[in-house]
Each structure stands twice: as structure tokens, then as C-alpha cells.
Amino acid sequence: MASLPLLNQPIHHLLKNHHPIKTSRKPPKMALTIRRKALNILITSLTLVLNTQRQETANAIDFRMTVPDQTLEEAETGIKTHAQNLLQVKDLLLEESYKEAQKNLRKSSSLLKQDIYTIIQAKPGKERPLLRKLYSDLFNSVTRLDYAARDEDRTRVWECYHSIVLALDDILSKL
């Protein structure tokens, strides 16, 4: 060890009577819990304030299933209009205006989704599984069309659009 430079030698023999120094103290558990609760309350209240101030919705798929006060009659009257709006995306797809097509697709499919879900919930229990399958097929095709439009994949766009038309005809005939 004597031939090694001072920096390469172990340090423990240089520090006689060495006692580890406590450099950090843990706060008491109770104080930590109070801080966490206060932080959670602050974050939650800020989130609520910011969400109530922002009235504009994003151009994304709306995950709400039903409008809270939507009646069966309102859903039945709105379903044809929303279905037509969904099919009118074809004009934008023909122009290859994919961004606008995505916006309109998301808006019309969201409203149609709410209408169809409300109608399915009003049906007898025996009819619901088939309707839910058709519902799932329709909106999975909508999602695939959204992705195809994002990727500007013309072939996939038209495949998805045609599957939407078929799925929409199928589910509307059963409702």
C-alpha cells in the first residue's frame, strides 16, 4: 500500500475515530402525510378550476357514453342526423382533406355513439349482446378510419369507410 499514490489508497485508515454524520433527517410521518394531502387538494382544486374555465372541447373522441338527460326519444330523433353526418365525411375524404375529415368524423361519431348507446340500453336484455357487438364493430371501424386518415393512407381510408357504411346499415336495421 505504501507504493500506491495517496489518492488510490483506501480512505478508511486515514479517518481514525470516524463516525458517520447524519446529513438528512426524515420528516415525521404525520407531517409528510399532511403535506401529501395538502398537495392533493391543491392539485385537485386547480384541475377543477382549469377545467371549468375551459369550455372549448378538443378534437378527440369523446368517451362519455350517454348524455345525462338524454331521453330515448331524443336519441331516436338524433340518430339519423348523426348517422348522415358521419357518412358525409366521404366528401372530405374524396378531397383528401384528412385533417378536416378527422375533425368531422370525431364529432359526428361521438354524437352517434351517445345516441346508439342510449337506444341499446333501452332494449330488452336478450337483444343487447348482438347490438353491442354491432356497436363495437361500427366504432372500431371509425377508430381505424381516424388512424388511416391521420396516416393519409388512401387505401385503408376507403376500406374503413366502406366497413363503416356496412356496419352502420347493419346496426340501424336492428335498432
Image (cartoon, grey):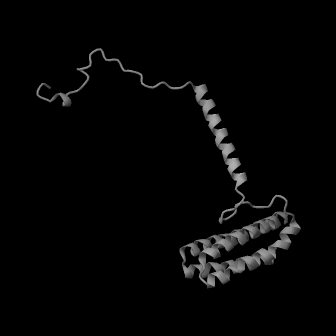
Give percent across and percent down for residue 93. Answer: 62, 81
Instruction: Say if 16 sits above or below 43 in the image.
Output: above
Q: Residue furthest top?
A: 17
Instruction: Say if 89 sits above or below 63 in the image.
Output: below
Q: Which corner quadrant holds the C terminus?
A: bottom right
Residue at the spot x=69%, y=68% of the render? 136
Q: Say how many tags the image has.
A: 0
Using the rendered view, name the quadrant where residue 29 is placed: top right
Instruction: Say if 81 sits above or below 40 in the image.
Output: below
Q: Residue furthest left?
A: 3
Residue at the spot x=64%, y=39% of the render? 40
Q: Which corner quadrant holds the N terminus?
A: top left
Residue 174 visible in the displayed image: no
Using the rendered view, name the quadrant where residue 129 is placed: bottom right
Using the rendered view, name the quadrant where residue 119 is placed: bottom right
Give percent across and percent down for residue 107. Answer: 71, 69
Q: Residue furthest right?
A: 73
Give percent across and percent down for residue 70. Answer: 84, 63
Residue at the spot x=17%, y=27% of the render? 6
Residue at the spot x=85%, y=71% of the render? 76
Q: Is residue 43 left or right of residue 116?
A: left
Residue 56 visible in the displayed image: yes
Q: Is residue 103 left or right of residue 155?
A: right
